[in-house]
């Protein structure tokens, strides 16, 4: 309780890219504290609830964990203070009484009578417990819902998406709203065994083949010449964005929506890695590989993600189809936590930290030891080189929250103010020393606060 009070007392204002000093940014540790407290089944001390609700009011990312930790008293308080009304909107039935998850009539009452935000929250919560019941609830009122509401409700089906959702999504392909139709098509394409995915596979396969007449086999592409009504029904947007060719626009959508399992059989029995390594004729490689990247992300296919990422030490740090850091980050999310951390560590060892921020954000916390070592070593190299220190403040802030607390003892050697090279930024040495001291202090604090929440060992 004392630790929670100290975390909540640290108000924003001193944090950010230019934060100086050695004191930890306590508010940035609050999400981890709440996650650990919720995982171990703790409840909020009643006296902490006002400050907890104030913190959650200012930071939407805190709200789910904070409200779970705060429990029913938070809803009671929120009815007494307009500043905390967000808690009522975020909880199923917050405006009245929460439905009993075992009572279908209670759930149906809230679904039929609740505010829109309450209904979205209810549908999302029910979907996580009973996907079929949530879908059945949505089907009951689907025909009478507003188009913008149908879109939000349909988006909730992403959680627990499975083959049983196909019939409902197929019907949604004929919806009056273009956005609803597009979302239904996207969800169906994420089901490789769906009828829509099969239709897209036929269309995409007709556009891509291997030319075996060359000395070195190569992929040849013949993009669609038209976008017919059937393609539009299956979610292909006919009008290309400004500056984009229509045929390449249609091709990208077909390949993106086709099951990745289509390609080994279509392209000579090759593995994804072998397919990605093939040259692509007539300048189509970027378009084709980018579409495969989007398909790998949508279908959460680790093998294709691995092939498209390539080696982290590759020149320009990119795989064959990873055309941006954001795209690499999405591909990495399809890999397991250990493999993801190892790839990012290899990227940092080869290319440094200047482009690694987005990639670090998808790695599991606490960072695996190889990744933690790579980040610390790269920071140390940047410091010794006299690099402009403020450009690394974002990575340093991530390290404070994500490094394993056990790394603190290994950082003690970095606390001294280093000798500054002649071409170093003025004051860089002092900044680096402060930053490393804050990092060590924060790691030790994180270690202590997590230990405080650990269950006590029973007495022998």
Image (cartoon, helix red, strand yellow):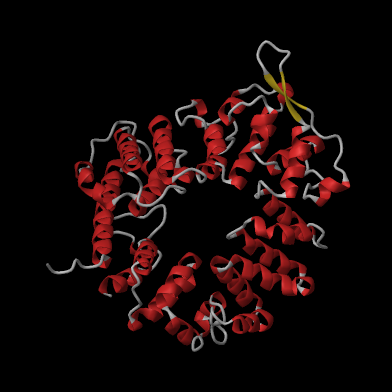
Give me the residue at 71% from left, 12% from top: 214
Relative height, residue 196 to residue 222 (above, below): below
Q: Position of residue 126 (x, y in %)?
A: 57, 71
Give me the residue at 39% from left, 77% from top: 51
Q: Where is residue 303 in the image (x, y as percent from the top left)?
A: 54, 37
Relative height, residue 441 to residue 391 (above, below): below
Give me the residue at 42% from left, 43% from top: 391
> Where is residue 204, by image quadrant?
top right
For the C terminus, give its image quadrant.
bottom left
- Could you say which is closer to the camera, residue 365 or residue 263? 263
For the N terminus, give its image quadrant.
bottom left
| Residue 411 visible, this angle | yes
Left or right: where 169 falls relative to 228: left
Left or right: where 63 falls relative to 170: left
Relative height, residue 51 to residue 34 (above, below): below
- Could you say which is closer to the camera, residue 133 or residue 246? 133
Left or right: where 122 falls relative to 431: right
Q: Position of residue 183 (x, y in %)?
A: 71, 56
Relative height, residue 407 to residue 51 (above, below): above
């Amino acid at each position: 309780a004392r630790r929670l009070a100290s975390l909540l007392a640290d108000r924003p204002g001193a944090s950010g890219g230019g934060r100086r000093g050695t004191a930890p940014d306590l508010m940035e540790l609050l999400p981890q504290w709440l996650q650990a407290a919720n995982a171990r089944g703790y409840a909020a001390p009643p006296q902490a609830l006002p400050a907890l609700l104030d913190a959650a009011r200012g930071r939407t990312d805190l709200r789910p964990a904070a409200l779970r930790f705060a429990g029913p008293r938070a809803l009671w308080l929120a009815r007494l203070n307009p500043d905390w009304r967000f808690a009522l909107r975020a909880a199923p039935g917050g405006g009245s009484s929460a439905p009993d998850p075992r009572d279908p009539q209670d759930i149906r009452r809230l679904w039929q009578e609740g505010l829109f935000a309450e209904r979205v929250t209810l549908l999302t919560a029910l979907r996580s417990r009973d996907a079929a019941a949530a879908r059945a609830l949505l089907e009951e009122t689907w025909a009478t819902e507003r188009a913008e509401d149908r879109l939000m409700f349909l988006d909730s089906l992403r959680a627990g998406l499975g083959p049983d959702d196909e019939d409902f999504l197929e019907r949604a392909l004929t919806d009056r709203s273009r956005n609803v139709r597009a979302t239904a098509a996207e969800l169906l394409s994420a089901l490789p065994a769906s009828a829509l995915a099969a239709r897209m596979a036929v269309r995409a396969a007709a556009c891509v083949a291997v030319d075996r007449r060359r000395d070195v086999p190569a992929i040849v592409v013949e993009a669609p010449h038209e976008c017919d009504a059937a393609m539009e029904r299956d979610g292909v947007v006919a009008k290309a964005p400004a500056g984009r060719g229509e045929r390449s626009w249609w091709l990208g959508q077909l390949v993106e929506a086709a099951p990745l399992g289509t390609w080994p059989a279509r392209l000579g029995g090759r593995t994804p890695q072998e397919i990605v390594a093939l040259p692509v004729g007539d300048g189509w490689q970027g378009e084709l590989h980018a579409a495969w990247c989007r398909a790998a992300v949508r279908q959460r296919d680790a093998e294709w993600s691995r092939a498209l990422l390539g080696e982290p030490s590759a020149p320009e740090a990119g795989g064959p189809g990873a055309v941006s850091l954001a795209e690499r980050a999405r591909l990495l999310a399809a890999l397991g936590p250990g493999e993801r951390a190892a790839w990012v560590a290899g990227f940092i060892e080869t290319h440094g930290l200047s482009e690694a921020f987005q990639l670090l954000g998808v790695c599991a916390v606490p960072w695996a030891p190889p990744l933690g070592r790579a980040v610390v070593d790269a920071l140390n190299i940047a410091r010794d080189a006299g690099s402009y220190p403020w450009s690394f403040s974002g990575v340093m802030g991530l390290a404070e929250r994500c490094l394993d607390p056990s790394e603190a003892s290994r950082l003690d050697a970095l606390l001294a103010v280093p000798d500054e090279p002649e071409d170093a930024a003025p004051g860089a040495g002092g900044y680096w020393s402060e930053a490393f001291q804050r990092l060590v202090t924060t790691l030790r604090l994180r270690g202590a606060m997590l230990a405080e929440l650990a269950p006590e060992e029973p007495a022998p």
